[in-house]
Amino acid sequence: MHHIATILFVGFGIASLVFSIAHEAYWWKRRHWIQARGVVKGCKESWDDGTRYFAEVQFEGTCGPKTFVSQYGSNRKPMIGSEVKIVINPSSEAAAEVSISHRILISLAFSLMGIIAIAVGLSVKPIKDGEQ
């Protein structure tokens, strides 16, 4: 039975680390994107897992104002009219909202979960007959 626990914990840990690395690689590709400021013009609400708010952000594109909906939701309603940091893809004018929680905290959380799960998985010992 301990082999199953070891496999599950180590497997989950590896999957978490892979997700963390993929998330950082996703943001690393954006390092050549243009950094700019956008203005929150509204928000979309989602009630899938409780209320989540996705900011509608407007920025100045090459052909005038452009608007996008952030792919990162929050449980707090964004303040309309507030400025946010964004990155803009120069080739397609796709944009994304930037904040510490969108980048570093997600990668850090999954890295820590992965390391802890692997450590727990590798420390699982078989149960001896007298310990049941």
Image: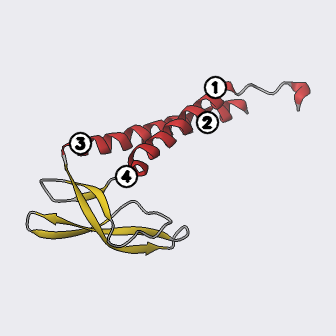
Q: Are marks 2 and 1 in contact (CB under 8 Å)?
A: yes
Q: Which residue is mark 2?
A: 9
Q: Which residue is mark 1?
A: 122
Disc 2 packing (10 Å; few <14; some 14–19; many ≥20): many
Q: Which amino acid, mark 1?
A: Leu
Image quadrant holding the N terminus, namely: top right
Q: Earlier in the sequence, mark 1 or mark 3?
A: 3
User: What's the mark number on residue 31?
Assistant: 3
Dot 3: what SS?
helix
Q: Name the image quarter holding residue 82.
A: bottom left
Q: Report whether 37 appears left or right of 24.
A: left
Q: Earlier in the sequence, mark 4 or mark 3?
A: 3
* Front label number (4 vs 3): 4
Q: Mark 2 and mark 3: span between their CA atoms?
A: 33 Å
Q: Position of residue 84 (x, y in %)?
A: 31, 60
Dot 1: what SS?
helix
Q: Mark 4 and mark 1: span between their CA atoms?
A: 35 Å
Q: Mark 4 and mark 3: span between their CA atoms?
A: 14 Å
